[in-house]
Image (spheres, helix red, strand yellow):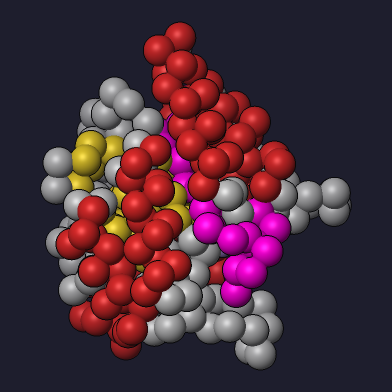
Amino acid sequence: LTGWKFAPEKTVIDVDGVKIGGENPVVMAGPCSVESKEQILETARVVKEAGAEVLRGGAFKPRTSPYSFQGLGERGLELLSLAREKTGLKIITELMDTEHIEMVTSHTDIIQIGSRNMKNYALLKEIGRLDKPVMLKRGMASTVKDWLLAAEYIMSEGNQDVMLCERGIKTFCDDTRYTMDLSAIPLVREKSHLPVIADPSHGTGRWELVAPMSRAAVAGGADGLLIEVHPEPKNALSDGPQSLKPEKFEKLMNELEKLNHAL
Ligand code: PEP
Ligand code: MN
């Protein structure tokens, strides 16, 4: 790759005791959007009980339509902090704008950069100057090479705690919401020292496919999973059709435990 600057041993990111890129895959789970105090605390409780180590939840949402729910903003971040206090889960949430850097970093343990912002180089450079782990989602129409170079935009500014997230790409195929590029997982493991996370929720858009694709991703070498879970998917304000109910998530966590032993 041109522009490749750092080539150390495999990166292990220590998020306050939770090691990403180490021996065991780390599960980050929670709703697409933080919707209310009850919703986020209940989801945090069930995902923690099932064995997740990181709670996900969007407070600033990059919706396709400006008329769709845009997230609770700062109130959503405060609710994530409250969930962290009550459960001990680490938090991951999306940062969309340089304007919100201080506000978001004060409430989160990992900054999520969304698919739509993978090539927002001004934002990536700013994040590169922070001392905070980052998960860089793959642009939905980006090659693996562009994705790895986007990660370099962060690292070349100083911040080395970058993990990648395969979240599906646009292809001719419209049977699923995106096409989950499973091959990108072992490919990235071969080409990069950075941990790679799989997001089968956005990757497929269908909750029925989330468990099998989670198992496939872990078997393929993923360092972690990002999974949408909602107490009542049919009432979710975003991404209900791809969200697991708590009992399905618990079942998946049991399967993953067995798979991890077998690998
Ligand atoms: C999300 O994680 O809810 C999200 C919006 O992801 P992406 O940027 O991959 O679409
Ligand atoms: Mn979502």
Q: Which residues are magenta?
A: 221-242
> Which residue is more in the foreground, 253 or 67?
253
Rendering quadrant holding ligand 2: bottom right
Res 139 → quadrant: bottom right
Front residue of 143/216: it is 216
Left or right, residue 184 beside residue 171: left
- Image-quadrant location for residue 209: top right
Q: Is residue 182 visible?
A: no
Q: Position of residue 227 (x, y in %)?
A: 51, 48
Q: Is the residue 67 above or below the residue 107 in the image?
A: below
Position of the C terminus, as image quadrant, is: top left
Horizontal side of 100 relative to 231 (left or right) equals left
- Residue 191, how many percent across, how many down? 44, 32
Q: Residue at x 85, y 53 (%)?
A: 174
Residue pictured at 47% horizontal, 75% vertical: 35
Residue 233 is covered by the magenta coloring: yes
Q: Residue furthest top?
A: 262
Q: Residue at x 23, y 69 (%)?
A: 82
Among the 4 quarters of the image, the one containing residue 56? bottom left
Residue 165 on the magenta span:
no
The total number of labels drawn is: 0
Q: Is residue 256 above or below residue 48?
A: above
**Residue 210 seen:** yes
Residue 238 versus residue 106: which sits nearer the camera? 238
Identify the residue at image location x=58%, y=83%.
69
Residue 97, percent across and down? 39, 81
Query: Picture coordinates of residue 86 (x, y %)?
Result: 21, 59
Asked whether, in this view, residue 73 is left or right of residue 203, the answer is left
